[in-house]
Amino acid sequence: MAEAQLFVSQDEFTCSVCLDTMTDPVTIPCGHNFCLKCLTDYWNQSQVCSCPQCRQTFMLRPELKRNNLLNEVIKKLKKKALSPPPPPKNYAGPGDVECDFCTGKKFRAVKFCLTCMASYCQTHLKPHYEGDAWKGHKLVDPDRNLKEKLCEKHQKSLEIFCKTDEMCICMMCVVTGHKNHEMVELETERENKGKQLGVTLSDIKRGLEEREKTLKETRRTMEEMKTIPGRSHLALMTSLPGPSQWKKILPAPAPVMSPPGLNQWQMILSQTHMTSLPVSSMYQSCC
């Protein structure tokens, strides 16, 4: 016979003496209930036997016996309060990966098995943790774009990087099409590429800093040329960056001319973002 559902809380079974859920509840003639120990101590310290709640007095001290029915109800309530709450209904929403084994409304997948090639919700994933037949299966986080990370030919996970062909392959590819090739684990290759990228970025950053330093020196020289119109051509050429420095600034080295022509100055200034200077007047003053 199915058990009846209880729609009451523990607060309704609180002893008014200890203000806690009753233990070994007893019922006295007035109808109120108390803990057996609480009521016994209360009466032992009092000259009269009265109800601690309604103050009804009894001529004879009632015999206290445990209310077995009430005691069973309280036990069930305590057990229900200690049991963990049921798992929430995590139905798959927009952007979530659905469980491949749910029927009707599907739950959200929590793992993808690379051996079974299927997505599992928390309930359907249990055999992979409990059954011996599934212990060797490899579980990963579910991914909506997981198919793009699988081998197109064998539909297996890409776990190996072939250095000979510069491509990611699966274990089946290793046997069928990449014999005697130089190969490493994909994770190892990813770490190596990450280190190489870090070195490259450091070199680029250092080059940019040097380029910025050279540009600042060029701007300073141009400002001096603007404020000192009588400066000699030799002093001008000496203060400008040398050919090796211009290679860091300009995309291609300009042909060396003496003295620089007006078109060359326009190109230099445009590369160094100094187009606000009076190019024609500066050229005339220098030459």
Image: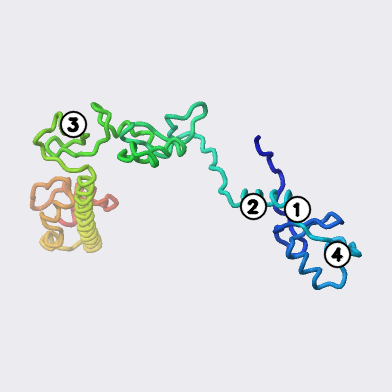
Q: How many marks?
A: 4
The amino acid at mark 4 is Arg
Query: Is residue 252 toward the left or the right of residue 23 in the image?
Result: left
The quarter holding residue 6 reads: top right
Q: Nearer the viewer, residue 58 or 166?
A: 58
Label 2 neighbour load within 10 Å: few <14, some 14-19, many 20+: some
- With respect to residue 197, does 233 lie above or below? below
Which image quadrant: the N terminus? top right
The CA distance from mark 3 to mark 2 is: 59 Å
Of labels 2 and 1, earlier in sequence is 1
Q: Nearer the viewer, residue 198 or 148?
A: 148
Q: Nearer the viewer, residue 186 or 285?
A: 186
Between disc 2 and disc 1, the foreground one is 1
Between disc 1 and disc 3, the foreground one is 1
The CA distance from mark 1 to mark 3 is: 74 Å
Residue 145 at what x, y percent from top left?
Answer: 35, 33
The residue that mark 3 highlights is 173
The amino acid at mark 2 is Lys
The CA distance from mark 2 to mark 4 is: 31 Å
Of labels 4 and 1, earlier in sequence is 4
The amino acid at mark 1 is Asn
Query: Is residue 101 toward the left or the right of residue 137 in the image?
Result: right
The residue that mark 2 highlights is 78
The residue that mark 4 highlights is 61
Query: Is residue 137 toward the left or the right of residue 250 in the image?
Result: right
Label 3 neighbour load within 10 Å: few <14, some 14-19, many 20+: some
The residue that mark 1 highlights is 67
* Residue drawn at x 86%, y 73% as measured from the top left: 47
